[in-house]
Amino acid sequence: MPQINGGTKICGIFGYPVEHSFSPSMHNAAFEHLSMNWAYVPFPVRSPDLPAAVESVRALGLAGVNVTVPHKQAVAGLVDELSPAAKLSGAVNTVINREGLLAGHNTDGEGFVRALREEAGLEAASAPVLIIGAGGAARAVAVALALSGAPAVFVTNRTEKRAVGLCRLLSDGTGCETAVVEWPCETEQMGEKRYLWEDVLNSVGLVVQTTSIGMSPDFDSAPPFPFHLLGRGHTVVDLVYNPSHTAFMKRCRAAGARVFNGAGMLLHQGAIAFELWTGRKAPLEVMRRALKEGIGN
Ligand code: NAP
């Protein structure tokens, strides 16, 4: 536990609910390791209270906050300036307070790109990517990949109009080549879709599963997917990190793909936020250990 005193710098997380967040243990472990007089506090903030909570960052002199569900989009309209990724994705997960000026960043997407490089050894610009899902996490990841030079982004989503919206946002905002792909069905029902999916999976090197399917306690569910078309040339990332091996990951691995869960993204988004607030390099292995203990794997 940090010794709180007059010089302690405070940061934290705004969300509702927020008690299950792993960020406090990850950041407080980092502060302790570096003997920094900082503390990270979870703040349960209900939606009607969000504008006052954001104002309190200034009023109380907090160094900054993370922002989680359900506030990531609303906070983008409450800060003074936005990073290019936050502006394009319309979502903020990290606020920095620079002497009263609040800057909104999206380290989720950047964290994904950094995790891809450092955990999977893959550069965002190296191959076209397929994104499964078109919600908030999909947006953050797709925008970061496009801004990092991904040659093309394919999007498939149960509700197709959200996939269309995401593709439009990417092509208008970054010039990245995009295409919507019809939502897959079970392999034996694919019919003509089989050829479309063969083409898509022949051209992509990275598949990112961004839907909430497979999250605990929904251990056995996976989105429909032509798993048999995957192979050794594919890297698959499931943004779900609890459980650490989703049903989707197991089926992709069985087909020969390299698979990763979402813990790397969670770790690196936290490390980037840490660096933005403190100006110091994040002690990654300390944060990784705290996260692992929190998630329980
Ligand atoms: P969201 O904005 O609510 O989006 C949910 C997405 O899942 C949408 O594309 C939705 O499709 C799809 N979906 C949900 N249930 C479905 C079903 N039964 N069948 C087909 N599609 C379904 O949620 P989010 O914030 O993007 O979060 C999505 C996942 O990412 C969660 O598991 C979350 O924990 C994870 N995440 C991980 C990290 C990390 O650091 N690793 C960070 C952020 C989020 P429709 O559009 O058709 O509804």
Image (tube, rainbow, N blue to C red):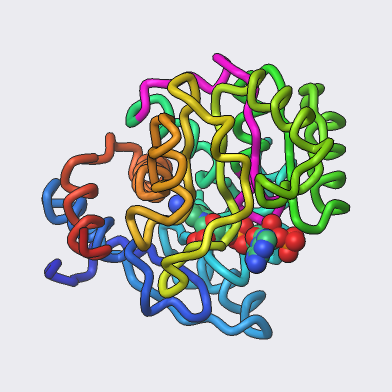
Residue range highlighted in magenta: 120-140
Q: How many marks?
A: 0
Q: Specify whether residue 72 is painted magenta.
A: no
Quadrant holding ligand 1? bottom right
x 53%, y 81%: residue: 45
Please tell me whether residue 69 is drawn above or below residue 48 in the rendered image.
above
**Which of these two is toward me, 138 or 187?**
187
Q: Quadrant of the N terminus?
A: bottom left
What is the x, y in percent for residue 136?
A: 66, 55
What is the x, y in percent for residue 266?
A: 40, 50
x 18%, y 41%: residue: 285
Q: Report the side of 282 relative to 77 (left or right).
A: left
Q: Report the side of 290 relative to 11 (left or right).
A: left
When asked about the image quadrant of residue 132, the answer is: top right
Please tell me whether residue 217 is drawn above or below residue 122 in the rendered image.
below
Would residue 78 be seen by someone viewing this image from the given angle?
no
**Which of these two is toward me, 292 or 234?**
234
